[in-house]
Image: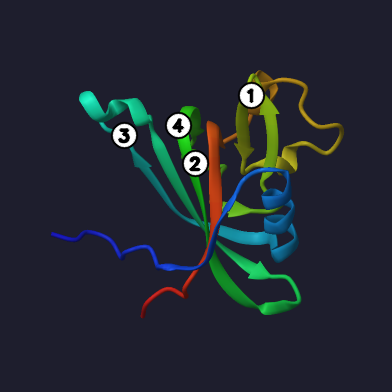
């Protein structure tokens, strides 16, 4: 039984979420008014649990230079150690700013509510998590451009 529309296949990528990969992601997409379309959490238990929790975030974002074209992009996070998904009424799943990527304690912090940081970047992982409705701490990850959504 299939309960949801499958995530589209990759068109480009995967590219690592390292310094160059993040710069490439942020130069390809305009995230203002983009929409978080899907959050997929995957965690195995038992003998295979060593690979850790995986998270896939699928975001519909505008392609820079082609402002009328929306394209699905996914962030695949591996070995996710901590996350917060707050489905409160105040959070609409619309991203007003690009995701904020920081590193603390050897983990990549991905904050999808970065508009709250109008000043200097956060100074610790606790500051990243405090007040964010959608944030993840992972050992690493990749990003990919996806084919358009099926009709």
Q: CA distance from mark 2 to mark 1?
A: 20 Å
Q: Mark 1: which secondary structure? A: loop
Residue to which mark 1 is pinned: 130
Q: Nearer the viewer, mark 4 or mark 1?
A: 4
Residue drawn at x 40%, y 68% is: 8
Residue to which mark 2 is pinned: 77
Question: Residue 134 at x, y = what percent?
Answer: 55, 38
Contact between marks 3 and 2 (CB within 8 A): the answer is no
Residue to which mark 3 is pinned: 43
Question: Residue 117 at x, y = what percent?
Answer: 78, 36
Q: Nearer the viewer, mark 1 or mark 3?
A: 3
Q: Which image quarter: residue 4?
A: bottom left
Residue 98 seen in render: no
Q: Which image quarter: residue 27?
A: bottom right
Q: Earlier in the sequence, mark 3 or mark 2?
A: 3
Residue to which mark 4 is pinned: 79
Q: Earlier in the sequence, mark 2 or mark 1?
A: 2
Q: Earlier in the sequence, mark 4 or mark 1?
A: 4
Q: Mark 3: which secondary structure? A: loop
């Amino acid at each position: 039984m299939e309960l949801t529309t499958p995530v589209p296949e990759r068109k480009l990528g995967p590219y690592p979420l390292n310094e160059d990969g993040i710069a490439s992601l942020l130069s390809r997409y305009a995230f203002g008014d983009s929409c978080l379309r899907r959050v997929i959490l995957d965690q195995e238990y038992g003998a295979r649990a060593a690979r850790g929790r995986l998270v896939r975030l699928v975001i519909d974002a505008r392609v820079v230079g082609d402002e009328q074209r929306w394209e699905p992009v996914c962030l695949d996070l591996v070995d996710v150690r901590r996350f917060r998904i707050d489905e409160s009424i105040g959070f609409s799943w619309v991203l007003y700013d690009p995701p904020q990527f920081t590193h603390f304690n050897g983990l990549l912090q991905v904050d999808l509510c970065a508009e709250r940081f109008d000043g200097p970047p956060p100074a610790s992982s606790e500051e990243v998590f405090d007040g964010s409705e959608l944030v993840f701490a992972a050992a690493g990850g990749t990003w990919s451009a996806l084919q358009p959504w099926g009709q």
